[in-house]
Amino acid sequence: MLRKAMALTTLAAFTASFQPAPLEARTQLPASPAQQTVLQIQHDPLACVTVVAAPLVDARVNPGAQVARGYVYFRASGTPYFYYAIMAGEAPDLSATLPRPLPETRTVDYYVQATDRIALSRKTPQYVPVVVPENVCKGKGLVVGPEGAGLTIGLTDEKQPPVPPGFNSKDIAKVILVTGAVVTLAALQMTTGGTASGAAAGTSAGAGGTGAATGGASAGAATGGVSTGVLVGAGVVVAAGAAVAVSKSHGKSSPQSVTNHFIEGDVTWSGTGIVGIQLLDPTGASVGTSIPVTDCTLTASRTARVFLQGQSLATGTYQVRLTGTSCGAGTPPTITALLTVLTDAGQKCSSQIIAVPVGTTVPGCSFTLP
């Protein structure tokens, strides 16, 4: 037990420096009055949604070459907090799937926001589609099986509950905390009970910090939200901005056996130069949504990411590839990077340190999903 506690403490302390900035800092940086984004969003608003199909929100964001990310922010009308879904696809055509509303939800609020490569953003007006019976609404939606839609949603405030009020929890597989850590919904429910009283099991502050490694819950968790601290303290491993649950059996920790809905690969480095990350599926095709680093003026620790989600991911061997890119003078011939891969079944590739030659694509690691 002592060795296990020391390992968790070391891992949390090591990865704390790699935590991405909170959502607001990443996507809504204030623009100078002289600067305006060139992005334009074209979107046909949803007139209605149903409780049987997961709403599909699509948009065209131009110019596509300037798009860094797209989001759909949503909530049940009358509730205080917005949640978000990251839009997938190749710009300018982006889309995101939202959880199904519950029968008691009357209307849904949502809007689309896109961020360009210099962190300026544009968003649409807020739309309010009504929730109606299936045979009435002809809106776009994803047919959902008994296991749910396998979606990943993001939080915008540490005080909000992990499941959006008024939406079907079966559709949610992963939750992005305000720290950027990605956690299974099952892990959140297991460690916090989905309530403020469960989350308040610890007595320290700071998601992802040293206090978190000792099992404390942040003030946000104590008021009904969730924090990285309470997850680490309850046996959830946090690594390079992501987290997975571990179960305890016969005195040993082992990954939970779950259907694979999610793969995330993170590569973290510092100094001059850029490292790109690519995920190949068992057929050798490049898959997933890439969140690259493109700003050559940055030299502090930063992370590029690729993630893939779905109702049930293909089984077989996946590969991760890394590419080193020069940022001109001062770029070393080789960039040292930390590679971490996580899935519903647990961590893959064991947080490898890899030397990535500039101008070359090299194998990062390979792993198999059962």
Image (tube, helix red, strand yellow):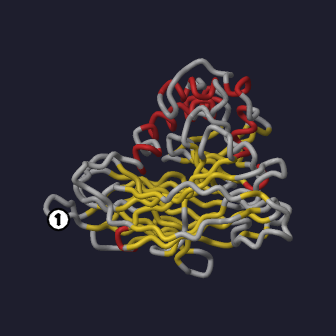
Q: Which residue is mark 1?
A: 328
Q: Is residue 82 left or right of residue 315?
A: left
Quadrant into which the C terminus falls? bottom right
Q: Is residue 85 left or right of residue 295?
A: right
Q: In percent of the image, x 25 and y 55: which residue is there? A: 35
Report x, y in % for residue 92: 45, 74
Depth check: give the residue in front, 343 or 43.
Answer: 43
Circle 1 Cα neighbour tier, 10 Å, few/some/many (<14 / 14–19 / ≥20): few
Report x, y in % for residue 274: 31, 61
Report x, y in % for residue 226: 62, 34
Indicate whether 71 appears above or below 288.
above
Q: In percent of the image, x 71 and y 32: which residue is there? A: 192
Report x, y in % for residue 105: 78, 49
Q: Is residue 167 left or right of residue 62?
A: right
Which amino acid, by three-letter code, is at mark 1? Gly
**SS at mark 1?**
loop
Q: In percent of the image, x 60 and y 66: which residue is there? A: 45
Residue 172 in view here = yes
Residue 369 in view here = no
Q: Quick one: which residue is furthest to the top in this view?
A: 203
